[in-house]
Image: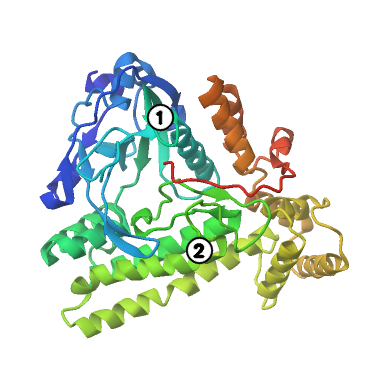
Amino acid sequence: MAKQEAGWNLENSYVRMPSSFFTDTNPTPVNSPKLIILNQLLTTALGFNIEALQSDGGVAVLAGNKIPEGAVPIAQAYAGHQFGNFTMLGDGRAVLLGEQITPRGDKVDIQLKGSGRTRYSRGGDGRAALGPMLREYIMSEAMHALRIPTTRGLAVVATGEMIIRETELPGAILTRVAASHLRVGTFEYAAQWGTVEDLKKLADYAIERHYPSIEANENRYLAFLEAVIKRQSELIAKWMLVGFIHGVMNTDNMTISGETIDYGPCAFMDTYDPAIVFSSIDIQGRYAYGNQPYIGAWNLSRFAETLLPLLDENQEKAIEKAQEKISNFSTLYHSYWLSGMRSKLGFFSSEKEDEALINDLLDIMKKQHADYTNTFLALTFDTKGMCESPEFIKWKNRWQARLERQPETKDSSIELMKKSNPAIIPRNHHMEESLEAVVERSDYSVMERFLTVLSNPYEHSPKQAEYALVPDSKTPYRTYCGT
């Protein structure tokens, strides 16, 4: 497949990094690849030709059977704190083809996930199952539509091979697009096993790629730390505002770019509960919904530790500078979260009592086991969303009085709330129905309808109403690290 036919326009800047940061790795070919889904809007935005990627030659590239022109395939090394425990990691089943230069001049990673064993596989088979790859595709597209920074899926290809997990499952490869795959864990790897010069090269690379505006700063590495803290505080606030639980916030799953990455045991919350956990392996609730801001700060502290040699020659001064920046995380996060909650409740201005009003609502929601998303929709459209208890009626009167104190009209507040409260999220039961239809019956229609309604969550159309219904199930929903 010629470069001009498909639109491949690859650079390979990461291979200029120290050789210990990656290993040259070709994807392992598969028997009979079949294209399951292609993200056509993303395909065009990246400068690819849709027909070319859908052709046999295009699918061969997406399956790892053919290397596109200009690619230098590698597996990246990184480390990470997994549930608080530090370990050596790396791309155990993913290969980075290179960085696509888009028609707008942006640079994005193109990675094949599930493409076979690498040096970092640690006994794994390097493969992935169809269900989890489609799950990541759907979740990342939903997050993108919710205006939350995220990696995205370009395509999912079935491999024509079965893989062994608890049972035999059909295999698949996800083509993942990311601003980059640099993680907090990448810096932990450099700090643990590289030299200070290696660490400096990595930091300079990350700054050039993601934060070029700070290159001229007197202490660019301190500015770098500050910039990553800012992006992550804003990202986690956005998760919290839509009821998203990442599920496995290990340091290797926190990006330097500020994108959401690795949709393993993640889910969106139905009933509001800060202690809710979906991941089957998070026995202690470390990554519960309400813990996410605290874990974010913990992860960023590990990131700051890796940068200490670059912040100041004097270690005590370096620690002091790092601690000052990390201490700002809570303030930044809270500011983003509070601003977002004000918008969800239709507030254009700020009042001292807003936070108490917000927290009181959340307390009532928890007591009444109210659905998080639907409660805010009910307030937006003035419909019944919770039990009309005296406590809630009293709160609602306070809220309406607050709205009346601002100069903006009620209609303006409603419009703000409609833009801030999604009509639809990828609810767990709809996700499972979509995946089951594809994997068990080769029926793509359920997934296609689901993706269509998820693509514009603030449309508030009648066709989205059925997806807002919550099943009456007493069985706790569980997710697994299948991706």
**Percent from the top left, x then y, of residue 370?**
74, 56
Between marks 2 and 1, how big is the CA–CA gap?
Answer: 35 Å
Q: Badge 2: how crowded within 10 Å, few (<14), some, or many (20+)?
A: few
Q: What amino acid is at disc 2?
A: Gln
**Percent from the top left, x then y, of residue 11?**
20, 38
Q: Quadrant of the N terminus?
A: top left
Q: Which mark is residue 155?
A: 1
Q: At 26% across and 49% down in the image, what residue appears?
A: 90
Q: Is residue 310 toward the left or the right of residue 100 in the image?
A: left
Q: From the viewer's perspective, is residue 51 above or below residue 44?
A: above
Tag 1's secondary structure? strand
> In which quadrant of the rendered view does residue 212 lie?
bottom left
Can I make out residue 43 in this image? no
- Residue 11 or residue 376, whichever sits in front: 376
Q: Earlier in the sequence, mark 2 or mark 1?
A: 1
Q: Badge 1: how crowded within 10 Å, few (<14), some, or many (20+)?
A: many
Q: Are marks 2 and 1 in contact (CB under 8 Å)?
A: no
Q: Is residue 455 toward the left or the right of residue 481 in the image?
A: right
Q: At 53% across and 57% down in the image, what residue appears?
A: 238
Q: From the viewer's perspective, is residue 199 above or below residue 455?
A: below
Q: Which residue has dot 2 on it?
A: 284
